[in-house]
Image (cartoon, rainbow, N blue to C red):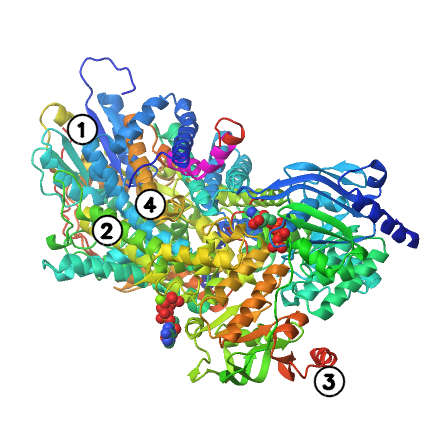
């Protein structure tokens, strides 16, 4: 339906009314909701109550942000809306009509589509094939028609993509774009984005936000989940905060601010992080002229030199796909070094097995925690001991000491606030953020002298992120060196003593914390001086 | 257990233990014989098929414990077990199908896959029927004594008719693999062989081309296979265990069981060559020749060296098995 | 003349040995593309062989036998499907259990029907059908166009199944399920329905592969007739990289090397002949392994192959 | 270990009883179709498996090779290495062990040496697909499976020519010397030392290895997420290699025990498919040594019991396979059945 510009204002007006009477539902306002849910409850088979008495609404043409700590139930709620989960009880009204959303197809028919926190793309398929999958085609597969549709939709919204590219070869930002395009090809009115920004660079975030604004201008609604209060403030019209499976509050964005939101998300939260600078000591890691090949055999790191000092955090800034991943994997022994050397003090790490490098005190927080950081079907405590189960006291003469592992795990669980029912629960029952916390906890607690951290706070809530930052600085003050790779420029700037910019497999610029020129840094990231 | 037979005298209970499924021709022979014995002699018959060598002892004991009077173990791999168990149960009769038993005592009989006389006849007929002077054999493994006797018989029979005959043996190296047998037979035919002794099942279908033209003739083995391919099979080398089984059972019933080695010779009806009547009618001269030959074999006027050097250079051993020891006679 | 007979005979033997493998591996290719590993095709082939034989024997009509073998194959595979799709049981064990069931049922009913008398056989076989015209082409005609209906179906099925898997939206969905059934179900694809459909296709092909053995290649039934051909077909699927053309290549490779091993074995002369002919029987297996060494490195199959899937 | 009747124990007992009962109901259809009494049939299945000392021992004797093979397979499967080649590994182990035993003759070293060589034989045969997998990334399902046939033809060749017994008329090895024979522990039965070694030594060792050691931990980590295991510093290839080779070792022992405890010579027909039965047993026991132990006894008992039943009641032998298949399915599906009954309110969750 075409929407007049006035509609936007009208919704703003409605917003106030709704939030004032958010728990009641008078029929007049209800008919203006795109979605209205009431009294939703969801219990997982393991007994976790992830949503209780959730009442929530989305208006036509609004951007609605969902905030809440890790495990608050945000993902669960939106999965219910998109038909991936069925609630135990509660009512869902779409355009005023009570509906049951049994499966994602039904959701799409009702105009609701979701981009999951973990993408739902088939990596071996091309963009067009992935999109064709969800268009209800039958008979002969006409990929040309699908490509035509993609072109049409992407032109409308200036979302460029090569329909013949294979998903596994695309960077995250583009994969996300494919997900969004797919929903648009299915003509959905309400797009749900679950933590879309957590792995994007600021530029990519800006691109995404532009898209969201364009969508809004075409009358579509967007639900966006994020842990970054700033982003919620920047993009949304209204914000709903969840905690412990319940909705705490829904407020219009214009009437709130960062501090209030942070305090609502984590009850009574007030930032206590004191950012200080490190006192770099002697060099610990010396990388000379390092070259590494990428997945497709291309030279991804081209002769990089790097010196990391004790008690220093070195940030590597750059748009994903410029060799950061390959560099890190080479340093941790996970990828072959073609030429050059990597020295830890006097010990040569070049092409040594990962275990050797781990034993030498290099720990690593990989970006893809689920695939590379944890074994989902094993318990929380086993995962916390993944890197040192072969050492005393966790095992002796190959015999595992389960008690000491569990004890160690309980300690870390409470120290890092990991929400797990008990140390023996499998990791698969943890929320995305808590899996992240688990990996961070393991890597920051094993007495390493070098920490390689890739997006360490992606997907973590404010409190957890702050705890990670706190821990990193604490380690730095004890002389640990850290290599921080993050898409989040704020995080890099906040923590790093020194920042190098990586572009096209090379370091193209270096800043100390004091000589930082953000404009220049941003330009360097894009490859222009 | 299940039937309500008249309780006059408890029936004589015979059990047969087979290593392969009943479909195996080797098993069919004994099975048929025991079914006949059941109908004619009123015995009770029970069988176990697909019994492995590791299982046979346990099953023998179970039969013994449930009152069976005679246990027939019908596989080479069972002979050591039979040889060991038999002396422990003097009141039970045992019969072992091939092997090297020695503990015959009063209750153990050993019988062989003894149809080389009929195979000899088949070989002679093959030599008469071939146009190319090339005959072939499709068989399982080389160096199996029981089987070699047959092959020797067939080759000797063929050479009896034509010493210059070319005989090719194809080993499929499996006890049961019809597709392989069929391929082996095709290879023989392609090389010019036009009569094949089918020691293993699976060759008849190879003997015709796609238009149904007969490319080669064949001989069935062990059971009468003439009907399986009436336009191809000249006749079958048939093993008939009923005369032997009858003699054993009757011996046991009259407390006169003959232990020791049994040979299912032609003169007792234990082995025979069964002509396919169509071929018999079409080849009267060959037929009458074969009848004469048969008589000579039975009379003992024809016998042959069991170690024959074959045309393709393969020595078929097994010569240490005596050829004519007719200690079993139809009573 | 003689040489032609040898060559044509060899080719015919190779095609014949390959034909049941081709049908079975094509069927298995379809279901494995959907992420299901069906080791139960061994049993489904046996059921096809048994039912085909019984159907033909009892009605005296070979084409009824073909039909019953297809029906039996489909039913057997659907039972497997019910276990792994509906009940979500382990695919490997369910497949092996189906093989036990099939062996049990065949032996049981075959005995009940026949153990009291002579063993049954069919008076006739489904023989080759020469395609008018095409079969007249010298050499090629005899080899390709004078075959049984089973070979024709197998050969026609290769491009058809290729089309189905790669050129239809059914195939796209099937492949997506094989890669990630959870994602596919999030996208609203009915995982179970597509898997059942793929199993029906497999059942028909595999049942036919079994029927081929007892109503076209031989005219008796024996419970050992399938002799691990189902398992070999599963290997061929992997060797053929889950592609129907690969399945064709793999089946021909196996069929021709098996034929070759027997062919050479038959013509060996000399005292070592039996020994060498026995060693030659390893040939198809060794060659298949070597083919993998050459072309099977780091081959990626359907990512979700063999793993259970249930919603939630 | 003290047996507490917790809720979950009671539930597992119900689960087992109900699933087995349902399986029996299904098999009854077959009996009723042929006019046999199903109750009597079940009675004889039980009697056939455990009816007296001798039958019980026979069940254990049959359990032994299945247990050894499936313990090995549990190690491999835990690591998601699909070893379909236990049959071939069993043959190669048995062959190697037999050659050793026959050539060493009657020496006190014969038995230990032949066991050791059988282990090496099984390991070596498994090492080939293991190397192909870890070095070249070649799918082990197909290599292990195909190598079964290579092994069986190779063994057949050895038995037909170089290692053929000089004094029989059949392709088989000579008898192993007395010193290689596993002693009988219970006179008048076939309870040989191998049975005890399997249950009292191999089983606890594998249990310890899989549950208590760092190797067991690596097996699971590599099986569940090789990528994360590699990132955690585990040598994934080495773990996979060891898992496959260890399963080959156990299959090799299983083969040798069949020779030294039961058949006393090596034959081309040594195993009636233990290598394949082991797959079912390992997965049925969920790759847990205790579960594997219970399911190997279970399968051996059903096999022996139902084959006895088929004899006593004159049922075609196909019933043995059928009952095994049905029971495997129902035991595997027992959790589903239980959930279904709980949902229908027949049982309280
Ligand atoms: N599949 C599952 N099985 C059992 N419990 C689950 C499952 N998924 C989530 N949970 C639990 O439900 C609760 C809510 O999870 P949910 O994923 O909705 O959180 P979230 O708000 O999205 O958190 P995050 O910000 O970390 O993504 C958590 O306590 C989590 O442990
Ligand atoms: N403390 C150490 N100092 C130097 N090198 C080491 C140390 N520990 C391990 N390594 C090296 O790391 C590699 C793997 O170590 P290790 O021998 O412990 O592995 P493993 O336990 O046998 O393998 P895995 O545990 O992955 O199966 C070897 O190359 C070894 O030389
Ligand atoms: Mg979430
Ligand atoms: Mg170690």
Measured Cα–Cα span from mark 3 to mark 2: 71 Å
Secondary structure, mark 2, is helix
Residue A321, percent across and down? 64, 73
Rendered-image quadrant of the C terminus of chain B: top left
Locate residue D189: give its quadrant: top left
- Front label number (1 vs 3): 3
Residue D72, percent across and down? 33, 53
Secondary structure, mark 3, is loop
Task: Give the vertical position of B39 relative to A30 (above or below).
Answer: above
Query: Which residue occupies the extreme left position in the image?
Result: B105
**Residue at mark 2:** D201
Measured Cα–Cα span from mark 1 to mark 3: 97 Å
Measured Cα–Cα span from mark 3 to mark 4: 66 Å
- Front label number (1 vs 2): 2
Q: Please, which chain is the residue tagged with disc 3 on?
A: A
Query: Badge 1: how crowded within 10 Å, few (<14), some, or many (20+)?
Result: few
Q: Please, which chain is the residue tagged with disc 1 on?
A: B
- Front label number (3 vs 2): 3
Query: Badge 4: how crowded within 10 Å, few (<14), some, or many (20+)?
Result: some
Name the mark on residue B290.
none
Q: Which residues are magenta?
A: D322-341
The answer to whether one can see residue C187 in this image is no
Secondary structure, mark 1, is helix
**Residue at mark 4:** D290
Name the mark on residue B65.
1
Rendered-image quadrant of the N terminus of chain B: top left
Measured Cα–Cα span from mark 4 to mark 2: 13 Å
In the rendered image, residue D336 lying in the magenta stretch gets the answer yes
Indicate left or right for A114 with D288 as reference: right
């Amino acid at each position: 339906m075409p929407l007049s510009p006035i509609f936007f204002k009208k919704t703003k007006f409605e917003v106030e009314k709704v939030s004032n009477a958010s728990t009641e539902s008078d029929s007049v306002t209800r008919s203006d909701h795109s979605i209205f849910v009431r009294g939703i409850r969801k219990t997982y088979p393991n007994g976790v109550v992830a949503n209780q008495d959730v009442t929530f609404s989305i208006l036509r043409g609004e951007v609605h942000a969902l905030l809440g700590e890790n495990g608050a139930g945000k993902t669960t709620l939106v999965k219910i809306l998109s038909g991936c989960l069925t609630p135990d009880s509660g009512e869902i009204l779409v355009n005023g009509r009570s509906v049951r959303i049994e499966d994602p197809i039904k959701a799409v028919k009702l105009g609701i589509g979701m981009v999951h926190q973990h993408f739902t793309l088939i990596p071996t398929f091309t963009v067009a094939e992935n999109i064709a999958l969800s268009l209800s085609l039958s008979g002969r597969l006409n990929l040309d028609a699908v490509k035509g549709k993609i072109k049409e939709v992407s032109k409308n919204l200036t979302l460029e993509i090569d329909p013949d590219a294979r998903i596994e070869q695309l960077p995250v930002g583009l994969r996300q774009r494919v997900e969004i395009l797919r929903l648009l090809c299915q003509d959905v009115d309400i797009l749900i984005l679950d933590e879309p920004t957590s792995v994007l660079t600021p530029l990519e975030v800006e691109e995404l936000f532009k898209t969201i604004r364009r969508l809004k201008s075409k009358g579509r609604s967007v639900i966006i989940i994020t842990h970054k209060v700033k982003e919620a403030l920047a993009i949304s019209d209204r914000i709903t905060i969840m905690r412990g499976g319940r909705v705490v509050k829904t407020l219009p964005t214009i009437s709130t601010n960062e501090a209030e939101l942070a305090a609502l998300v984590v009850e009574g939260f007030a930032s206590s992080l004191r950012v200080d600078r490190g006192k770099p000591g002697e060099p610990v890691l010396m990388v000379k002229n390092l070259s590494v090949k990428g997945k497709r055999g291309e030279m991804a790191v081209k002769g990089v030199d790097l010196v990391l000092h004790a008690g220093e955090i070195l940030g590597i800034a750059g748009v994903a796909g410029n060799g950061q991943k390959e560099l890190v994997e080479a340093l941790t022994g996970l990828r072959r070094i073609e030429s050059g050397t990597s020295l830890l003090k006097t010990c040569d790490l070049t092409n040594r097995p990962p275990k050797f490098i781990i034993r030498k005190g290099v720990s690593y927080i990989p970006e893809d925690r689920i695939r590379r950081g944890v074994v989902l079907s094993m318990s929380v405590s086993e995962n916390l001991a993944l890197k040192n189960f072969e050492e005393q006291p966790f095992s002796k003469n190959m015999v595992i000491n389960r008690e000491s592992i569990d004890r160690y795990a309980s300690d870390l669980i409470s120290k890092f606030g990991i929400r797990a029912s008990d140390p023996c629960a499998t990791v698969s029952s943890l929320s995305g953020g808590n899996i992240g916390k688990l990996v961070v906890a393991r890597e920051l607690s094993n007495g390493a002298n070098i920490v390689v951290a890739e997006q360490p706070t992606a997907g973590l809530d404010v409190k957890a992120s702050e705890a990670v930052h706190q821990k990193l600085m604490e380690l730095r003050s004890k002389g640990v060196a850290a290599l921080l790779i993050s898409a989040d420029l704020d995080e890099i700037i906040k923590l790093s003593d020194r920042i190098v910019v990586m572009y096209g497999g090379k370091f193209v610029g270096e800043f100390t914390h004091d000589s930082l020129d953000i404009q220049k840094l941003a330009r360097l990231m894009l490859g222009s001086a | 257990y299940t039937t309500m037979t008249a309780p006059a005298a408890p029936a004589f209970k015979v059990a047969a233990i087979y290593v392969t499924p009943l479909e195996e021709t080797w098993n069919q022979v004994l099975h048929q014989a025991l079914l006949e014995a059941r109908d004619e002699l009123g015995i009770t018959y029970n069988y176990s098929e697909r019994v492995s060598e590791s299982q046979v002892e346990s099953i023998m004991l179970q039969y013994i414990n449930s009152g069976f009077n005679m246990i027939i173990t019908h596989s080479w791999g069972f002979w050591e077990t039979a040889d060991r168990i038999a002396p422990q149960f003097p009141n039970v009769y045992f019969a072992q199908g091939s092997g090297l038993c020695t503990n015959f005592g009063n209750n153990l009989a050993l019988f062989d896959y003894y149809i080389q006389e009929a195979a000899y006849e088949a070989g002679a007929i093959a030599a008469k029927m071939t146009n190319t002077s090339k005959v072939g054999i499709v068989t399982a493994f080389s160096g199996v004594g029981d089987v070699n006797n047959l092959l020797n018989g067939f080759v000797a029979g063929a050479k009896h008719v034509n010493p210059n005959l070319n005989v090719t043996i194809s080993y499929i190296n499996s006890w049961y693999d019809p597709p392989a047998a069929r391929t082996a037979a095709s290879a023989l035919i392609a090389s010019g062989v036009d009569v094949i002794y089918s020691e293993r099942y699976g060759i008849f279908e190879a003997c015709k081309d796609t238009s149904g033209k007969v490319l080669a003739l064949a001989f069935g083995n062990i059971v009468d296979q003439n009907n399986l391919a009436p336009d191809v099979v000249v006749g079958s080398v048939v093993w008939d265990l009923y005369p032997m089984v009858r003699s054993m059972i009757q011996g046991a019933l009259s407390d006169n069981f003959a232990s020791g080695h049994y040979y299912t010779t032609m003169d007792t009806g234990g082995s025979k060559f069964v002509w396919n009547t169509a071929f018999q009618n079409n080849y009267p001269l060959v037929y009458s020749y074969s009848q004469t030959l048969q008589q000579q074999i039975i009379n003992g006027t024809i016998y042959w060296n069991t170690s024959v050097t074959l045309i393709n250079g393969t020595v078929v051993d097994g010569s240490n098995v005596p050829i004519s020891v007719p200690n079993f006679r139809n009573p | 003349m003689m040489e032609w007979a040898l060559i044509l005979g060899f080719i015919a033997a190779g095609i014949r040995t390959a034909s049941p493998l081709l049908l079975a591996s094509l069927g298995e290719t379809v279901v494995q593309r959907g992420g299901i590993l069906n080791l139960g095709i061994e049993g489904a082939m046996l059921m096809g062989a048994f039912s085909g034989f019984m159907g033909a024997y009892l009605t005296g009509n070979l084409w009824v036998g073909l039909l019953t073998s297809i029906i039996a194959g489909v039913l057997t595979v659907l039972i497997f499907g019910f276990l792994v799709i509906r009940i979500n049981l382990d695919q490997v064990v369910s497949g092996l259990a189906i093989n036990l069931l099939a062996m049990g049922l065949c032996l049981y009913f075959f005995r009940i029907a026949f153990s009291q008398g002579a063993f049954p056989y069919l008076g006739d076989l489904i023989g080759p059908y020469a395609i008018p015209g095409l079969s007249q082409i010298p050499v090629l005609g005899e080899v390709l166009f004078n075959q049984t209906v089973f070979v024709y179906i197998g050969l026609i099925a290769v491009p058809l199944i290729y089309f189905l898997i790669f050129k239809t939206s059914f195939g796209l969905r099937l492949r997506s399920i094989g890669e990630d059934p959870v994602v596919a179900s999030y996208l609203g694809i009915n995982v179970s329905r597509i898997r059942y459909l793929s199993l029906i296709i497999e059942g028909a092909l595999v049942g036919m592969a079994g029927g081929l053995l007892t109503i076209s290649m031989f005219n008796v039934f024996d419970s050992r007739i399938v002799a691990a051909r189902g398992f070999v077909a599963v290997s061929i699927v992997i060797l053929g990289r889950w592609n129907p053309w690969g399945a064709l290549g793999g089946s021909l490779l196996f069929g021709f090397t098996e034929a070759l091993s027997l062919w050479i074995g038959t013509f060996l002369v000399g005292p070592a002949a039996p020994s060498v002919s026995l060693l030659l029987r390893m040939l198809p297996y060794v060659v298949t392994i070597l083919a993998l060494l050459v072309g099977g490195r780091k081959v990626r199959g359907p990512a979700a192959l063999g793993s259970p899937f249930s919603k939630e | 270990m003290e047996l507490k009747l917790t809720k979950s124990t009671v539930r597992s007992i119900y689960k087992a009883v109900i699933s087995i009962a349902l399986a029996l109901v299904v098999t009854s259809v077959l009996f009723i179709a042929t006019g046999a009494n199903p109750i009597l049939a079940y009675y004889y299945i039980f009697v056939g498996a455990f009816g007296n000392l001798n039958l019980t021992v026979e069940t254990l004797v049959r359990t032994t090779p299945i247990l050894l093979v499936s313990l090995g397979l549990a190690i491999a499967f835990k690591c998601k290495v699909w070893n379909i080649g236990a049959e071939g590994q069993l043959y190669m182990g048995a062959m190697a062990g037999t050659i050793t035993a026959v050539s060493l003759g009657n020496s006190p070293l014969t038995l230990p040496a032949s066991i050791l060589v059988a282990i090496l034989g099984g390991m070596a045969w498994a090492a080939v697909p293991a190397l192909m997998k870890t070095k070249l990334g070649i799918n082990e399902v197909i290599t292990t499976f195909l190598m079964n046939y290579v092994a069986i033809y190779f063994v057949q060749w050895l038995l037909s020519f170089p290692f053929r017994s000089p004094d029989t008329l059949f392709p088989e090895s000579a008898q192993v010397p007395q010193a290689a024979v596993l002693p009988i522990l219970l006179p008048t039965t076939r309870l040989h030392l191998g049975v005890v070694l399997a249950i009292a030594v191999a089983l606890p060792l594998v249990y310890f290895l899989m549950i208590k050691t760092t190797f067991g931990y690596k097996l699971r980590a590599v099986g569940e997420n090789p990528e994360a295991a590699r990132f955690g510093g585990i040598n994934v290839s080495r773990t996979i290699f060891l898992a496959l080779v260890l399963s080959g070792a156990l299959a090799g022992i299983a083969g040798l025990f069949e020779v030294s405890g039961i058949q006393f010579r090596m034959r081309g027909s040594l195993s009636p498919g233990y290598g394949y039965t082991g797959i079912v047993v390992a997965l049925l026991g969920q790759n847990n040594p205790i579960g594997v132990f219970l399911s190997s006894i279970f399968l051996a008992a059903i096999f022996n019991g139902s084959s006895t039943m088929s004899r006593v009641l004159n049922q075609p032998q196909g019933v043995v396979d059928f009952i095994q298949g049905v029971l495997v399915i129902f035991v595997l599906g027992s959790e589903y059945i239980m959930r279904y009954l709980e949902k229908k309110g027949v049982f309280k969750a």
